[in-house]
Amino acid sequence: MAFTAEKEALVVDSWNAMKVDAAELGLKFFLRIFEITPSASGLFPFLRDTSVPLEKNPKLKRHAMSVFAMTCEAAVQLRKLGRVILKETTTKHLGATHAKAGITGEHFELMRYALLETIREAVPYMWSPKMRNAWAESYDQLVEAIKKEMRPVA
Ligand code: HEM
């Protein structure tokens, strides 16, 4: 099914509303992930061996914003091009980084769930099944692009 301009707008408009409070959003997103799977925090090198509290960790916020912003960008591409095309260097780098960090399909599923729940709580007045599906489709296609470049680490 085509990724329509309506779907693109559902993602872009809600992202524009949410990013006003990016720090809070990013924190809630990751707290949700770690609440469901506490061991996931061990995947992030910058969370190991640090006394910096989660909410003050700039790298965690940066990762959260990458996920939101790149999913939004994926929605724009899906509408324009019908598929997600990242710069080759970006996909290769993201594929390699995530493979090296031991990220699995289950982690991507966990993040997908947390992403949708975080959005639902952040903009309840915009939330609808259509909006949920537009975010989910964009996220899934983005993850497919990253996974294609994830090779087992020797
Ligand atoms: C690193 C994006 C999913 C864990 C990164 C980086 C980006 C990124 C941009 C930084 C790469 C660099 O600068 O070297 C994304 C996107 C995702 C996604 C767009 C999904 C659409 C996940 C998931 C997990 C995860 C599901 C685990 C639950 C990590 C880890 C690193 C990383 C552990 C390396 C951090 C470090 O070494 O400092 N990701 N990520 N990512 N990501 Fe993701």
Image: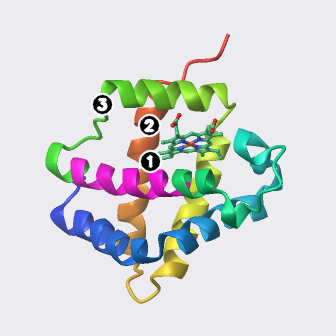
* Mark closest to the chain's N terminus, 1 or 3: 3
31 relative to 145 in the view: left or right: right
Please tell me whether mark 2 sits on a helix, a strand or a loop. Answer: helix
Q: Residue at x 46, y 51 (%)?
A: 66
Residue designated by label 3: 87
Does any atom of ligand 1 lie closer than 8 Å to the CB of label 3?
no
Type of amino acid at the residue the image marks with label 1: Asp
Percent position of residue 71, x then y = 39, 53
Tell me whether the residue at label 1 lies in contact with that at label 3, contact meaning CB atoms closer than 8 angstroms.
no
Please tell me whether mark 1 sits on a helix, a strand or a loop. Answer: helix
Q: From where the camera sits, is residue 44 visible?
A: no
Q: Closest to the observer: 41 or 62?
A: 62
* Mark closest to the chain's N terminus, 2 or 3: 3
User: Which label number is shown at residue 66?
Assistant: none
Type of secondary structure dominating the magenta stretch: helix
Type of amino acid at the residue the image marks with label 3: Lys
Q: Which residue is drawn at 44% across and 37% down?
A: 144
Percent position of residue 92, x then y = 43, 24
* In this rendering, the label closer to the viewer, 1 or 3: 3
Please tell me whether mark 3 sits on a helix, a strand or a loop. Answer: loop
Type of amino acid at the residue the image marks with label 2: Glu
28 relative to 52 in the view: left or right: left
The answer to if 130 sits in the magenta stretch is no
User: Which label number is shown at residue 144?
Assistant: 2
Which residues are the magenta region? Answer: 64-77
User: Which label number is shown at residue 140?
Assistant: 1
How far apart marks 2 and 1 lie (CA) works out to 6 Å
